Image (cartoon, helix red, strand yellow):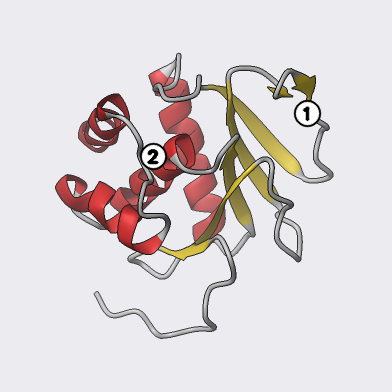
Amino acid sequence: MSVEPGPRPSAGEVLLPDGTRVRGRGRREPPAEPPPEFGLYLHRRRTLLGRPVLTPDWAAQWLDWPDFRVPRDGERAAAAVEHAYRLARDGRRVEVACDGGTGRTGTVIACMAVLAGHPAADAVAWTRQHYRPRAVETAAQRRWVLWFADR
């Protein structure tokens, strides 16, 4: 599949294999400008470092996804990833974030790469090359990407 080159991605922005753009970040980092139109937030609960997380000024969905693990409700999380990907594919500014922006966020970006047509078996390596070298931190998260692709 050939993708027309567009503007270079900004910090945290990933150009998926089909040309769709998504942003990944850690919640400790400020959102990119212009701000997202939709955020998918991967936390155990709406706290960061024990403090309540402020509600963003844009549409957002929160998933119960503990650090270094996989989501507590896999089907709900998979549907949320698909929804966020569709919004991004339709041209909306979408960000994905967890506390550090690496493990859980990288897992979602790998799943979005699969939705964008990249082979599931290579999605983690692709994400590490195009997003962050340590993305998708645990074996369980790597297995979850394969589960996501097979469902």
Which residue is depicted at the point 51% across and 34% down?
A: 80
Which residue is depicted at the point 79% across and 21% down?
A: 51
Residue 114, x across and y down, in percent: 29, 50
Residue 1, x across and y down, in percent: 24, 74
Q: Nearer the viewer, residue 115 or 8?
A: 8
Residue 31, x across and y down, in percent: 72, 53
Q: Nearer the viewer, residue 62 or 48?
A: 48
Which residue is depicted at the point 18% across and 51% down?
A: 122
For the question of whether residue 69 can be seen, the reply is yes
Amino acid at dot 1: Val
Question: Mark 2 = which residue?
Answer: 107
Assess disc 2: are there few (<14), some (14-19) or many (≥20) residues with their C-alpha within 10 Å of its C-alpha: many
- Is mark 1 in CB contact (under 8 Å) with mark 2? no
Question: Mark 1 = which residue?
Answer: 53
In the rendered structure, find residue 87 and report the number of the disc placed on it: none
Q: Is residue 150 left or right of residue 73?
A: left
Label 1 sits on a secondary structure element that is: loop
